[in-house]
Amino acid sequence: MPGRADSKLKTLYLMDILREKTDEDHPMSAADICQELDDRGVAAERKSIYANLEVLRQYNLDVVKTSTPKKGFFLGDREFEPVELRLITDAIQSASFISQANSRKLISKFEKNLSIYQRENFRKQVYIDKRNKTDNDAIYYRINELAEAIDKKCRAKVTYERRRLEEGSAVRNETRIMTVSPYAMVWLNDHYYLICNNAKYDNLMHLRIERIKRVDVLEQEPVRPVSEVSEYKGSFDTADYSAKIFEGFSGTVEVVELRCANELYDTIADLFGSKVAIIGADEDTFTVRVQVATSEGFIGWVLKFGTKMQVVWPSHIRDAVRETAEAVAKQYQI
């Protein structure tokens, strides 16, 4: 028929119809499918529908035939199940480094995996708190540029912006331009960080990626060997490093012994692994030996557990925790 879509497209249109218009609660009969195809400009008979459905099965599409409560066909297994999309969506919603606009675009793309009926229920549960979101919509470009530098093992010149409070409660943006050796990008405490070395110093530093406004990849300048700025030899161990830092603060990696109330075992095991070295225990407490990046973040982390956690060793970290606790207590003295 003149003006009709090529019938060779029928199988592809049929796949779209199954994905968009069917699920376990909404099967479609062969007659309904024929009508949907007709709306798309493809003529089809019921007999040919069965043959096309068989082709899709051979293509490993999970086309399910059902007779109750309604006779018809629906797409069973999908690339993502609704519960899996729920987890992905929750992660996107909680990620402060993804802007409100980009969050909605991402979620909308994932939604296409659902039927229109599942999508309707799914959207009722989506809530994006714009108060917790960056306004940097260009973060995707920065991530790509940093990934390129990491992949090519070359340095990058970054323009980094932070907010500063001045006298009179005025807030201004402070911009720094620095040349860094990038080693990894990690998601920690709902922020996305670049782990790198500033060429001026001999340690690792963290940069919030949503605060990076420009990246220039310096392909002719190789990264500084990570062994020069950390305890890692050969290559940077992202998983190991992530387990040692606290609240986004880097620091010198040291062995620390912690005495904890028994109720904190899950917290310790979640952070350091179930094979964490327990070196002592009694009826109420256990003592562990762990490697951590000792920093303000670590001290704050210890203090938030109050009397349920205590640094036993080394003495200089124990003293630092005590001095911080005394300084905090002093602020509340009347």
Image (tube, rainbow, N blue to C red):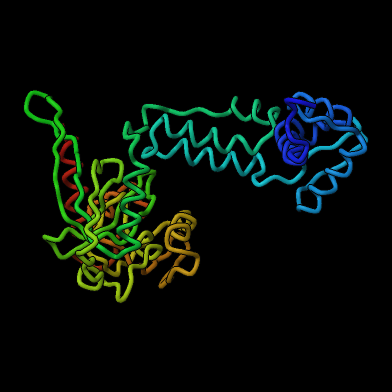
The picture places residue 83, in percent across and down from the top left corner, at 64, 41
Q: Could you tell me if residue 321 is visible in this image? A: no
Residue found at the very far left of the displayed protein: 167
| Quarter of the image where the C terminus is located | top left
In this rendering, the answer to whether 256 lies above or below 80 is below
Q: Position of residue 155 (x, y in %)?
A: 22, 60
57 vs 137, nearest the viewer = 57
Identity of the residue furthest to the bottom in this view? 233
Q: For residue 225, say whether it is visible.
A: yes
- Quadrant of the image containing the N terminus: top right
User: Seen in the image, is 334 located left or right of residue 187?
Assistant: left
Q: In the orientation shown, which residue stands out farthest toward the front?
A: 2
Q: Looking at the rendering, which quadrant does residue 66 occupy?
A: top right
Across and down, in percent, residue 204 comes to 23, 61
- Rendered residue at 30%/58% (across/down): 149
Task: State how many labels appear.
Answer: 0
| Left or right of 137 in this view: 316 | left
Q: Is residue 194 left or right of residue 66?
A: left
Q: Is residue 266 above or below residue 163?
A: below
Residue at (67%, 43%) from the top-left corner? 81
Measured along the vertical axis of the image, is residue 156 above or below residue 168? below
In this view of the protein, which residue sits in the foreground, 21 or 119?
Answer: 21
Residue 38 point in image, percent of width and height? 79, 26
User: What residue is shown at x 89% (from left), y 33% (from top)?
Assistant: 45
In the image, taking residue 51 as reference, residue 148 lies left or right, namely left
